Image (cartoon, rainbow, N blue to C red):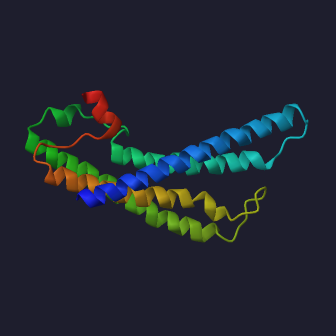
Amino acid sequence: MAMFSRVLDAFCHVVVVVAGCALVGLVVMMGWMVFGRYVLNDTPTWIERAATLSILCIALPVAAVGVRERFHLSVLGFREALPMQAQRWIAVGCDTTVGVFGFAMMIYSQELVEMVWNFKIPLLGISQGWTYVPLQVCGGLVTLFAIEQVLRDILNKDGPEQRGIAAAFLE
């Protein structure tokens, strides 16, 4: 279990670093768009579409990291009021549901990619399928992270574990 968690720690780190670099790129693109619009009086039209694609590449994988770090939206009041054993099984059920959702997102977004792969994004000249690849990545990561959470929920005798930012708020 510890080795699996270390590998997923590395995945999380890579996702956050890539998202950070993409965010810097997004800021540069937006700066170029504003410069082009107001200084050059010639708006670079490709930037809006590239920015949209960048936002997808940033938000979706980082949302998957949120599943692992448990800083996604969750309402714990009901679960926390229950006995520890019930808390564990509710956490297992919730994490399993999230994992199934992530797996479905990965599989069905593959169909979207295949359906539009031959079409080009007009201003960028790349395949329209790249719009849906971040969904596949997010779905795959959510599935992996949910598997880890389910294993932690089952193996941890003290009840559901809080990780990352959520744990910092509870301390």
State the image quarter where residue 123 is shown.
bottom right
Pick the front one: 115 or 35: 35
The residue at 86%/31% (across/down) is 38
Pick the front one: 93 or 2: 2
Q: Is residue 118 above or below residue 27?
A: below
Pick the front one: 7 or 84: 7
Q: Quadrant of the C terminus?
A: top left
Q: On the rendered structure, is 129 left or right of 2? A: right
Q: Is residue 171 above or below residue 67?
A: above
| Residue 85 in the image, given as x and y percentages of width and height | 9, 45
| Residue 132 in the image, given as x and y percentages of width and height | 57, 59
Q: On the rendered structure, is 107 left or right of 118? A: left
Q: Is residue 23 visible?
A: yes
| Residue 124 in the image, given as x and y percentages of width and height | 76, 57
Q: On the rendered structure, is 169 left or right of 51? A: left
Q: Is residue 101 visible?
A: no
Across the whole image, how many numbered discs are drawn on residues?
Answer: 0
Q: Is residue 80 above or below residue 154?
A: above
The residue at 36%/52% (across/down) is 9
State the image quarter where residue 79 is shown.
top left
The residue at 14%/43% (across/down) is 159
The residue at 71%/49% (across/down) is 49
| Residue 31 in the image, given as x and y percentages of width and height | 75, 36
